[in-house]
Amino acid sequence: MDLSARYKYYQTIRRGCYQNVLASAEFGWLRDAGIVLEIASKGCIQKVVKSWESDINWEAVLRSSNDYQPRNFDVSAYLGTELVGLAVGRVSKGKNIVRIDKLERKKSCRELEGIFALLVIQIASDYAVRLGASSVRITEPRAELVDYLERHGIGIFRKGGPNYPYDHVNVAVNGE
């Protein structure tokens, strides 16, 4: 399969994950609220850089973006035509882990308040299952996200170490 075909293949899988999660009982109401999920692009990352009051250095994210890999992970959330949430990451070379490197909700978007991270984790979990991966890993999560996930019994927080230098939350998929 050539590179262009691989891009289309993995984008089709990701779009299927977006649709699957928005059709679920847990997140279906978001569609009724006008939330649309789509592939993240450099253009939407640049939009964040220009318009959001962000704690994340999205310009650095853009420079180190892994979008040259067809199986990267990304989600952009729109309310109408306004970008209100963004997550980017990658899939490990062995396709064992779907990593979420950065995720953020536009602070003024109340529709995604308190659930954007859960939405992204669910999409990443669905993507992981479809690729045969065993886990989702959120790298360098903010302390409030770690607390939230621990309160809801989602994932296990681990400090960085010699094998993986970043603090992270590991979420098993497929009941593993």
Image: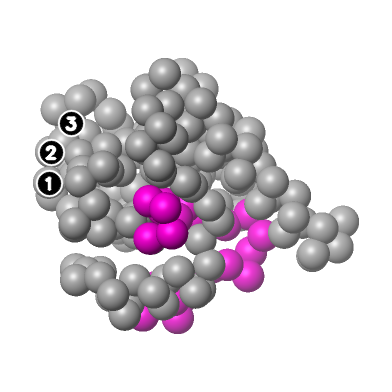
Mark seen at residue 144 = 1
Contact check, label 2 and label 3, Cβ < 8 Å: yes
Q: Is residue 74 left or right of residue 114?
A: right
Contact check, label 1 and label 2, Cβ < 8 Å: yes
Question: Residue 10 location, x and y as percent?
Answer: 68, 50
Q: Which residue lies furthest to the right in this view?
A: 1
- Tell me where the magenta segment starts and ends, as one range: 59-82
Q: Which of 128 and 159 is in front in this view?
A: 128
Q: Alpha carbon of mark 2 to alpha carbon of mark 3: how far? A: 5 Å
* Label 2: element kind: helix
Q: Alpha carbon of mark 1 to alpha carbon of mark 3: how far? A: 10 Å
Q: Alpha carbon of mark 1 to alpha carbon of mark 2: how far? A: 5 Å
Query: Where does label 3 land, which residue?
Result: 150
Query: Where does label 2 land, which residue?
Result: 147
Residue 105: quadrant of the picture? bottom left
Q: In this view, does 52 lie above or below 60?
A: above
